[in-house]
Amino acid sequence: MSTSRNEFLTRVRAAQRVALRDDDHAADVVYERFPLPMLPVFDTPEGNRRERFERSLVAMGGKLATLDYAHELPAWLAERFPGVTPVTATAEAASAAPLDVARTPASLHDVDVGIVRARFGVAETGSVWLSEQEYGVNALGYLVQHLVVLLDPRDIVDGLQDIYRLPDFASARYAVLVTGPSATADIEGVLIQGAQGVRSLTVVLLPRG
């Protein structure tokens, strides 16, 4: 038996946890909704934030590059991906083809290299935080063969708890933390990268502007 989306959501809302309060009279039982739990604050690990991000990124299979200025990006791309014209969601990659935000998401399956600028990085996990605003077309982060992510070192936060507290996280219609390239180790315990998404993830530490 099929259930419509609205019927399903109505049942979920009706089944929210409630607290029971009894004012010494059974007839006066009142049901109140539980408040959202407080997000705990964890201690920040010692050490340089940027260095911790770099270690975590590499540990999760990502690659790292460092550039000082945006005008160095075309030469780096040509060396890293010879003979390929990347598709970019950021104007900083002047040598790449601009992404058409009206493009059909499925049409990105034949793009070899996609470029995007992350809004934040997370030192704890080596992740980069992206929303629909950065992607332009969300499929850019999943259907291209190789993803290049520009990140300003000043945009690196300590941990996931810091990301959750930022207003950007709450205001985004779509947000994702990307940690390394696609990978799976389900079959015989052998790690295979690029099995279900991008084959490589390269974070280029490049200051904004």
Image (cartoon, rainbow, N blue to C red):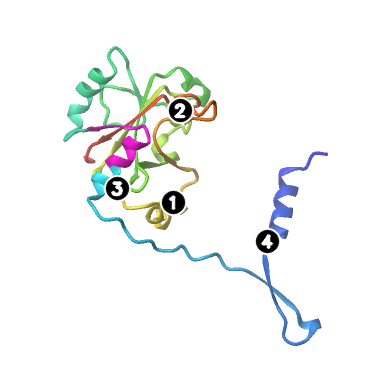
Whether the residues at callouts 3 and 1 have beta carbons within 8 Å, the answer is no
**Where are the magenta residues, as a range?**
54-65
User: Does 199 sit left or right of 63 as displayed?
Assistant: right
The alpha-carbon separation of the residues under discs 2 and 1 comes to 31 Å
Q: Quadrant of residue 69?
A: top left
The alpha-carbon separation of the residues under discs 3 and 4 comes to 36 Å
- Indicate which label's residue lies in the foreground, 4 or 2: 2
The alpha-carbon separation of the residues under discs 3 and 2 comes to 28 Å
Q: Residue at x 48, y 20 (%)?
A: 109
Q: Quadrant of the N terminus?
A: top right
Residue 146 on image: x %, y %? 38, 24
Instruction: Say which amino acid is labelled 3.
Output: Ile
Whether the residues at callouts 3 and 2 have beta carbons within 8 Å, the answer is no
Q: Please, what secondary structure does the residue beneath circle 2 have? A: loop
Residue positioned most to the bottom: 24
Q: Mark 1: give few (<14), some (14-19) or many (20+) Cα within 10 Å.
A: some
Residue 197 on image: x %, y %? 47, 27
Q: Quadrant of residue 56?
A: top left
Name the residue carrying label 1. 169
- Indicate which label's residue lies in the foreground, 4 or 1: 4
Name the residue carrying label 2. 191
Which of disc 4 and disc 3 is earlier in sequence?
4
- Indicate which label's residue lies in the foreground, 2 or 1: 2
Q: Residue at x 72, y 77 (%)?
A: 30
Instruction: Say which amino acid is labelled 1.
Output: Phe
Which of disc 1 and disc 4 is earlier in sequence?
4
Depth check, front residue: 69 or 198: 198
